[in-house]
Image (spheres, grey):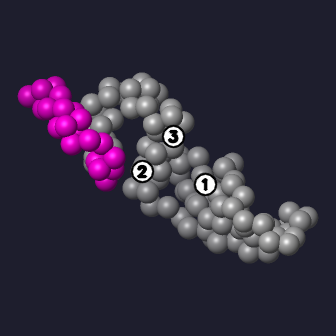
Amino acid sequence: MAAGLLEHAYTWQSVYRMGRFTLSRFLPPFRPKQENHIGEAITDDSGRIAYLKTFRLSETQVRRGHLLNRLAANDWHLANTAADLGINEAQLGLRLESAGFGLLLRQDVLDGYRKAGRTRTG
């Protein structure tokens, strides 16, 4: 049913512990055009799963997660993230806006990225 769930290594974060049980959340590596899941699990002190809930991500959600993941890996530095992705900073800014994250950028910065984008295409 969810073959892609078992094909990836996930990033796990323990969120809460109560007695011998631990609630953890997990994130995928956000690989485009592949099955990606996020979810949470409750495990006992032996590591056995007592509860598991996963959500399969759409391709749009995977692209958004990939962008946020790359930004976080580069300490939210736009120029470094753009270089990591093999694009320029203006292209990254426009990609962030297209993904619905335009509000993360100051309006004047976003306007500058838009202008730079029009200059390249015009």
Sequence-wise, the earlier of marks 1 and 3 is 1
The residue shown at (32%, 28%) is 89
Q: Mark 1 near mark 2, Cβ–Cβ under 8 Å?
A: no
Label 2: which secondary element? helix
Q: Could you tell me which quadrant the N terminus lies in?
A: bottom right
What type is the residue that disc 2 sits on?
Arg
Q: Which segment is the magenta one? A: 100-122
How packed mark 2 is, by other alpha carbons closer than 10 Å (few <14, some 14-19, many 20 or more), is some
Going from N to C along the chain, the mark reached first, 3 or 2, is 2
Q: Position of residue 84 (x, y in %)?
A: 46, 28
**Quadrant position of residue 92:** top left
Residue 5, percent from left and from top: 65, 60
Q: Which residue is mark 2?
A: 64
| Magenta highlight: main SS | helix
5 up-or-down from 42: above or below: above
Q: Which mark is residue 27?
A: 1
* Residue indicated by mark 3: 72
- x, y percent for residue 6: 69, 57
Amino acid type for the residue under numbered disc 1: Leu
Q: Specify which label sits upstream in the sequence, 1 or 2.
A: 1
Residue drawn at the location 47% of the way across and 50% of the way down: 65
Q: Is residue 34 left or right of residue 26?
A: left
Give the Cα distance between marks 3 and 2. Answer: 12 Å
User: Which residue is nearer to you in this view: 52 or 80?
Assistant: 80
